[in-house]
Image (cartoon, grey):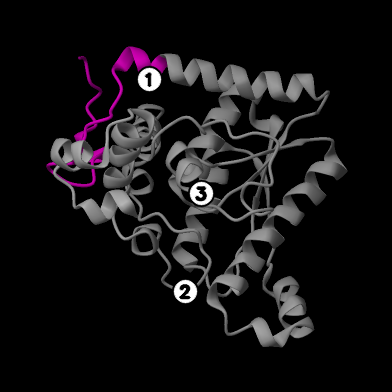
């Protein structure tokens, strides 16, 4: 199978399963996703789309494809930093917007979140609860902008997140569509490299930005290449638990997780 020069999108030299697409498949995915975005906007009678820019690879790829589909004027980016977010990552979000030439706003959500924390201080020691406040606040801001400008809200969820339930209800899944929702994370990185996203953004450590130092891999217990492989073989592929362990050479505990 013809591969793009993208060995760098793998998280290790020997991942459990190589899910990378051929060049032809990447081109087809690019065309399909951009057509999908354009159709969603057209069917809604909208004037464009709103996208929350986090600096991560999912939102960065979605932004690139949305601009291909809608043009620079068709996408309004919103970066929404809070005190728990890495300033370098949030700077990457603005960098993506500037590189693409789209309109964007920076909305500091810490003051908004603090009002929730003040309203129910008993919950502020719960890291997940407070982290979800940030995520849900971003969804409200996205829709505030979208409603005001007659736009749809684009999501950034990928296949691995959807299949594992790794998202916040009424938060990052409070969107009108998920253009890259059928791509495994490995394929997200590969398609991003294919459309010209800089390597440092392609290989950035994934984080939901829910608390300081939070990473997806630490929460899930293993990296996305392992998650992708188990989902592809055990869930999508239907292999048994024991067959998955043998086929991928991963711990049974990872499959159970």
Left or right: where 55 falls relative to 154: left
Identify the residue under disc 3: 165
Instruction: Specify the principal SS of the magenta part.
Output: loop
User: Gap in Å between the C-alphas at discs 3 and 2?
Assistant: 22 Å
Question: In which quadrant is the C terminus drawn?
Answer: bottom left
157 is higher (above) or lower (below) than 169: above
- Mark 2, Cα crowd under 10 Å, few <14 / some 14-19 / many 20+, is few
Left or right: where 6 falls relative to 140: left
Residue at position x 51%, y 68% from top? 85
Q: Sequence-wise, which precedes: disc 3 or disc 2?
A: 3
Identify the residue under disc 1: 26
Residue 235 horizontal/vertical position (percent): 37, 35
Which of 221 and 179 lies nearest the eye of the viewer? Answer: 221
Helix, strand or loop under label 3: loop
49 is higher (above) or lower (below) than 209: above
Closer to us: mark 1 or mark 3? 3
Residue at position x 40%, y 54% from top? 206
Q: Sequence-wise, which precedes: disc 2 or disc 1?
A: 1
- Mark 1, Cα crowd under 10 Å, few <14 / some 14-19 / many 20+, is many
Q: Sequence-wise, which precedes: disc 1 or disc 3?
A: 1
Dividing the picture into quarters, in which one does residue 188 lie?
top left
User: Gap in Å between the C-alphas at discs 2 and 1?
Assistant: 34 Å
Q: The magenta stretch spans which residues? A: 1-27
Identify the residue under disc 2: 212
Answer yes or no: do the residues labelled 3 and 2 have beta carbons within 8 Å?
no
């Amino acid at each position: 199978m013809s591969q793009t020069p993208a060995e760098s999108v793998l998280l290790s030299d020997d991942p459990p399963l190589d899910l990378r697409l051929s060049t032809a498949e990447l081109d087809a995915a690019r065309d399909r996703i951009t057509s999908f975005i354009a159709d969603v906007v057209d069917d809604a009678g909208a004037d464009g789309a709103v996208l929350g820019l986090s600096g991560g690879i999912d939102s960065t790829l979605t932004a690139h494809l949305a601009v291909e589909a809608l043009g620079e004027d068709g996408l309004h980016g919103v970066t929404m930093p809070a005190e728990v977010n890495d300033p370098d990552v949030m700077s990457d979000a603005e960098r993506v917007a500037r590189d693409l030439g789209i309109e964007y706003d920076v909305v500091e959500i810490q003051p908004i979140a603090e009002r929730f924390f003040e309203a129910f201080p008993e919950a502020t020691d719960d890291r997940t609860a407070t982290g979800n406040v940030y995520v849900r606040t971003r969804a409200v801001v996205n829709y505030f902008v979208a409603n005001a400008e007659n736009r749809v809200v684009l999501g950034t969820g990928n296949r691995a997140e959807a299949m594992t339930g790794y998202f916040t209800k009424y938060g990052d899944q409070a969107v009108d569509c998920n253009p890259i929702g059928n791509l495994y994370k490995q394929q997200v990185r590969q398609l991003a490299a294919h459309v010209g996203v800089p390597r440092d953004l392609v290989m950035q450590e994934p984080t939901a930005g829910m608390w300081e130092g939070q990473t997806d891999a630490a929460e899930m217990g293993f990296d996305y290449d392992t998650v992708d492989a188990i989902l592809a073989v055990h869930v999508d592929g239907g292999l048994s638990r024991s067959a998955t362990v043998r086929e991928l050479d991963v711990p049974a505990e990872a499959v159970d997780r």
